[in-house]
Image (cartoon, grey):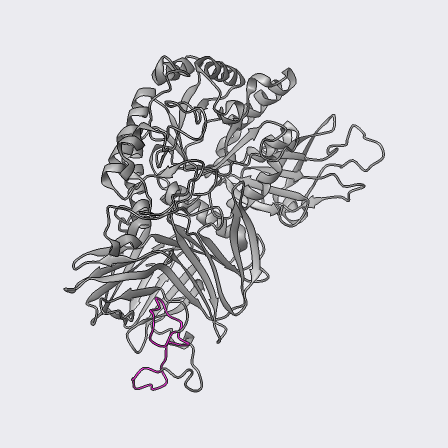
Amino acid sequence: MPIYTHDRQFHLQGQDVSYIIRILENGQLEQTYFGKKVTDRADFSGLAPMPNEPLGNANFPLKNSGFTLEWARQEYPSYGTSDFREPAIELEEKQGSRLSHFVYTDHQVIKGKPELEGMPGIYGGADECETLQITLKDAVLSAELTLFYTVFHLRNVIVRRSELKNTGADSFSINRLMSASIDLPDHDYESIQLDGAWIRERHLHRSKLKPGLHVIDSKKGVSSSWHNPFLALARPITSENEGEVIGLNLIYSGNFRGSVEVDTYDTTRIMMGLNPAGFKWELVPDDSFSTPEAVLVYSANGLNNMSQSFHSLYNDHLIRGQWKHKERPVLLNNWEATYFNFDHKKISDLASSASELGVELFVLDDGWFEGRNDDTTSLGDWTADKKKLPEGLKVLADDVRTRNISFGIWVEPEMISQKSSLYQQHPDWVLKAPHRPHTRGRNQMVLDLGKTEVQDYIIEAISSVLRESQASYVKWDMNRTVTEVYSDALPASRQGEVMHRYIVGLYRVLEKITSSFPSVLFESCASGGNRFDPGMLYYMPQTWTSDNTDAVERLKIQYGTSLVYPISSIGAHVSASPNHQTGRVTPIDFRFHAAMFGAFGYELDPQEMDGHTRKVVVEQIALVKKERALLQFGDFYRLVSPFEGNDTAWMTVSRDRSEAFLAFYRVLSQPNAGLKRIKLTGLDADKTYEVEWQEGSNRRHRQYGGDELMNIGWQIPPFFTGTVKTEDTHFYGDFQSAVWKFKESTKE
């Protein structure tokens, strides 16, 4: 039984996690404990803070005259009644009061997990999880707040959200309603977050907590590359494989806010949800508002264990449809090969050349629709350009498929160009503020997806493209952030609802299209990784990780991304050298070894390859096809961080521990480098593994015990020492890498 209910206490138990809530003296909820699993008992009140004398000077008129929320560890803190930390909820009555006081009234425990209507979320059956619903009421506001907690029997995960209902006769406004808030009893943590920018996404940053408020957020209309909607708190001793860590990830694709606050009593509050900046929602009588879901993960065994909890949860209970647990095809995208400059013959020749290499899917990127010769025009007009494709999209797609390769296509449906037929017909469909200059991003504007007619247009336009082309893959792009947030569909008092309505409208569009074309593989993109979040993964099982295809840069980008997101969701391609984003020249093997751990493909012109390179690429593709189940869906372990030095290493292990892939990367050559040994992890200590590898011109073969590889480590083959390059020298020069396959030995 994972949920225990007592008189004034609730105890949620997962595989190795406990989450305990108590009802406080004033009827509000206390966050009593979140951490390693403990045995249930009827009274955990001894875990509550017990000051020797009253703290603070704003006390509730209770029997305990010293009771105040100033030091209480609250479950869902409100604004303005003796708690001076960040609130989870702030409401505004018509007369201007922003106070609220929600007290416990009821609860229920249900098998399984209720669906969150109109929004992405975790799903789970009655045999996998249970959900606790706690209802609280504010009698003055006539409002009902329900807190949802889902716990999985065999996972260290708690899924949370909040729902507010107006049960009164008057409207009020929601200024803030967070998905989750957790109060922890001390501040001996380091915060971990994933930050960056375009072509520099999800770099890992770790810093010690200090008194005050620390915030990550997005006000860009997308979850953004600046800060991913993820936060973690790790003990200072926590490493990849040891120590305690709490992770928090928001299932949402728009403006969000995550915060960590250390108060004057050295307790810590971590919070995640919709960004209150620019947000205000009018809640009319009998109406309800639901927050996005937040996923809480607890690990007592380091960051790798936390990551695997996120990965397996998202693979098993977030990603849906025919591509759930399905190996991804090897693709070639024409963007860096042609940009806007192509015609039917050029695309046909590229597809033919790609097919000869073993590529399974050809993707036609930007530039295929009417008048689209650069980025100044045509977004919204989703019909084939008659000059480039005089016979139309269907004929081109059929021609590609005759080359024994599938056809995929790029679209950017949320955007509109001023130079387009759609804008001439519907200038009112654009998000823009009246009497204000209208900024552009990539020469384009943003459609108002809060309008049902705009949603319906996109659904039909993209469905028509898919029906005509019979595409088996769609790359769904979004190449600008949102500015001048104003909708002429809403009155002045409701302009604070625009961005959330946009995201909910986007989710309706995605649900309609993806459910109408269930066999199509959809990939999310937003100038690369500007919207890499669980909300998009609910509809599209993979994301274009970054527009930066430089293999060196990808080590950091993919390392950071793997902290939360499954390897199968990480789009990773081999591109041309010199790289188009950095100008860096790297060997084809190094580029391949960086890209092979993910949804794999190529971003180059195969017709420009010499004979040797073509032979190498054929071998690369054959290897990925043979091993992609392990590469994309094995348990992923980070071993050596690119944020801490010149080397990177990671590995993926099959669920039955019978096989594994290890990858090692050294960016710059080091003179007379020392010996390098890496301790592997995730193997079976009792198994014997055999491995073959190339060392210079020699082929090596050995057997190792799983305990040996994990406790002593794997010796990296010899580096060039600066004197004589021998036949055993494996690493020579900059940008060197290798992968090794370990397989359980069947020999006695």
Q: Is residue 81 above or below residue 541?
A: below
| 56 inside magenta stretch | no
Of residues 694 and 106, the one drawn nearer to the viewer in this rendering: 106
x and y percent of residue 307 in the render? 49, 49
x and y percent of residue 239 in the render? 58, 55
Q: Is residue 166 above or below residue 360?
A: below
Residue beneath the point at 36% across and 77% down: 82
Task: Note whether residue 170 is visible.
Answer: yes
Name the quarter where the N terminus is drawn: bottom left
x and y percent of residue 31 in the render? 38, 68
Numbered range of the magenta stretch:
59-83
Name the quarter where the C terminus is drawn: top right
Main SS category, magenta section: loop
Query: Extreme front residue here?
Result: 435
Residue beneath the point at 22% across and 56% down: 288
Q: Is residue 726 left or right of residue 42?
A: right
Of residues 259 and 522, the one drawn nearer to the viewer in this rendering: 259
